[in-house]
Image (spheres, rainbow, N blue to C red):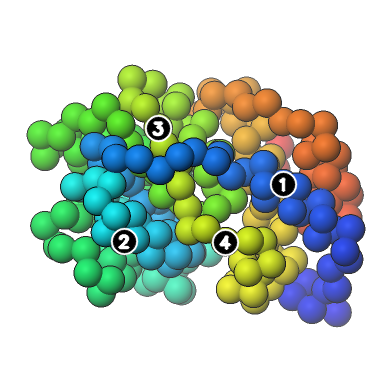
């Protein structure tokens, strides 16, 4: 049996749900100066960003991201470019969108977007980061480290974990990604990439159990 056919137990789903809920920041949506859609494999980021634009939450939207091994086949012209095209189809006007097509990681998403905005004469004091649901906390911690003078609000497409499993079509992969992001939340502050976040013991225990049970494909190696 390969990983994509692996049977996920109810306990493993429960553990994944604990980590999924922890990743969600629970910020209240409100008007901000700009929004930044963080590139990834998940086109739902662009959908959420378009929805938030139509709510009148911001006048300017940056899509940021080049490619990664995960997205090269899916978005061969780059994440930010694909996200922009999707947002245009959803009615976001072209003049409201800026594209940063080079970023290869979350830190670069933040620093290169900041530089792009500055080159356009935009110096925001509030920024909405739009990401995959399980990336909210890591994007918050990263942006808070690299852009400390800006107030960060995080949001994502509202989805339950079961719905996300269905949308991706591979429960093992989704749990691997959730686990991998939590490892980064815990490890990156020690490497100077992000601010520290409190991690409840129940979440740490769920992480340890899932790692012991082989949900490891997205872990960073020492």
Q: Which residue is mark 2?
A: 50
Point 20% across, 52% down: residue: 98
Counting residues from the N terminus, which is met first, the one under dot 3 or under dot 2?
Answer: 2
Find residue 87 and report its image quarter: bottom left
Q: Secondary structure at mark 2?
A: helix
Q: Which mark is residue 77?
A: none
Q: Which residue is mark 3?
A: 152
Inter-mark Cα distance, 4 to 2: 16 Å
Query: Residue 79: image x %, image y %?
Result: 37, 62
Is 14 on the left-hand or right-hand side of 140?
right
Query: Residue 207: image x %, image y %?
Result: 80, 44
Q: Which residue is mark 1?
A: 19
Label 4 Cα crowd, 10 Å radius (few <14 / some 14-19 / many 20+): few
Counting residues from the N terminus, which is met first, the one under dot 4 or under dot 1?
Answer: 1
Q: Which residue appears farthest toward the top when viewing the image?
A: 149
Query: Residue 62: image x %, image y %?
Result: 26, 49
Tell me the quarter of the image containing the C terminus.
top right
Q: Secondary structure at mark 1?
A: helix
Inter-mark Cα distance, 1 to 3: 21 Å
Closest to the observer: 7 or 58? 58
Q: Which residue is mark 4?
A: 159
Label 3 Cα crowd, 10 Å radius (few <14 / some 14-19 / many 20+): many
Counting residues from the N terminus, which is met first, the one under dot 4 or under dot 3?
Answer: 3
Point 11% across, 39% down: residue: 120
Q: Could one spot residue 34 in this view of the protein?
A: yes
Is 193 on the left-hand or right-hand side of 219?
left
Tag in front: 4 or 1: 4
Q: Is residue 101 above or below residue 77?
A: above
Point 37% across, 71% down: residue: 76
Label 2 Cα crowd, 10 Å radius (few <14 / some 14-19 / many 20+): many
Tag in front: 4 or 3: 4
């Amino acid at each position: 049996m390969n990983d994509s056919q692996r049977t996920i137990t109810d306990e493993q789903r429960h553990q994944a749900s604990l980590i999924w809920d922890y990743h969600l920041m629970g910020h209240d949506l409100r008007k901000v100066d700009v929004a930044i859609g963080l590139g990834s494999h998940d086109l739902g980021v662009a959908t959420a960003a378009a929805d938030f634009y139509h709510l009148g939450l911001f006048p300017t939207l940056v899509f940021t991201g080049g490619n990664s091994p995960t997205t090269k086949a899916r978005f061969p012209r780059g994440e930010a470019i694909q996200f922009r095209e999707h947002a245009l189809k959803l009615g976001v006007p072209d003049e409201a969108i800026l594209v940063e097509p080079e970023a290869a990681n979350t830190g670069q998403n933040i620093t290169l977007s900041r530089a792009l905005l500055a080159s356009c004469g935009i110096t925001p004091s509030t920024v909405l980061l739009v990401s995959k649901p399980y990336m909210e906390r890591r994007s918050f911690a990263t942006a808070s480290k690299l852009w400390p003078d800006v107030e960060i609000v995080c949001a994502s497409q509202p989805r339950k974990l079961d719905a996300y499993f269905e949308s991706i079509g591979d429960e093992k992969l989704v749990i691997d990604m959730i686990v991998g992001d939590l490892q980064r939340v815990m490890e990156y502050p020690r490497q100077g990439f992000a601010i520290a976040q409190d991690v409840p013991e129940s979440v740490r225990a769920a992480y340890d159990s899932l790692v012991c049970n082989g949900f490891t494909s997205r872990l960073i190696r020492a």
